[in-house]
Structures are given as structure tokens and as C-alpha cells.
Amino acid sequence: MSAQPKKMIAGMAVGLVGAIVALAAMAYSWNGDVDSIYNVALNMLVAMMFFAVAGGFSKQAPVAGKTLVVLAAINVAFAVIVAIYSATFIQVEFVLIVLAVVEVLCAACPKVIKWIDNTRSA
């Protein structure tokens, strides 16, 4: 078994940072009335996707390598949708989109895909 690629660790770290930023955006978007529930839910969706992709970069990855790339791409799509809906500040949404793109780049690395496929539990 080969050593874990550094991009796996970077992908997990970026995923956790993105989830924390999305959770902070979720907390900030709540203003106490029912109309803010949509913004809270959209930010929670992005946070959940960041956590899911970060979990895919773990040593016992629950998904195949190419599936992780698809999850990361879906994460980018959700971040863009939240930015279009303007659920929070556009600067925060831009940061989330950049973090999601970095996750796609980490997940799409052939070394990462090969390592995940070779070491994941069946």
C-alpha cells in the first residue's frame, strides 16, 4: 500500500474549511423570521456537501474515486446556485465557490483516484 497522497489531506482540509464557512454563513443568514429559512436551508445544503466531500477524502473512503469527483462537482453547482440565490454575502459565496473548485481539482487528480480505488474498503 502506497502512502496517502498529499492532495487527499489538502482536499479534506479544504472541505472542512468550506463547511465551517458555510455553517457560519448559515448562522448569519438567520434573522429570526420565517422568510430567512430558505437562506438557512441553502447554506446548510452547501455545508452538508462540503462535509460529504471532505469525508470522501478520508483513508477509508466510502465512495469510488470517480464518484468523489462527481460529488465535488455537485458541490460546485450547489455553491453557484446559492450565490445566484444570494443567500448570504456575495464575497462569502465567492469564497465557497473557490473552495469547491479546489476540491474538484484535488479529487480529479489521477493519483488520488487511483489511491482511493486501491485502498477503499469493499
Image (cartoon, rainbow, N blue to C red):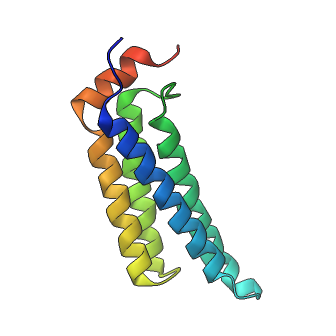
**Residue 49 in view:** yes
- Horizontal side of 15 relative to 102 (left or right) equals right
Q: Residue 65: x and y, percent?
A: 37, 29
Q: Quadrant of residue 75?
A: bottom left
Residue drawn at the location 48% of the way across and 79% of the way down: 85
Q: Residue at x 55, y 49 (%)?
A: 51
Number of marks in picture: 0
The image position of residue 122, as x and y in percent, is 53, 13
Q: x and y percent of residue 2 in the render? A: 32, 15
Residue pictured at 52% horizontal, 52% vertical? 49
The answer to whether 114 is drawn above or below residue 31 in the figure is above
In the image shown, does 7 or 53 lie closer to the viewer?
A: 7
Relative to 106, residue 3 above or below: above
Residue 42 in view here: no
Determine which quarter of the picture holds residue 36: bottom right
Q: Quadrant of the N terminus?
A: top left
Q: Position of residue 19 (x, y in %)?
A: 53, 59
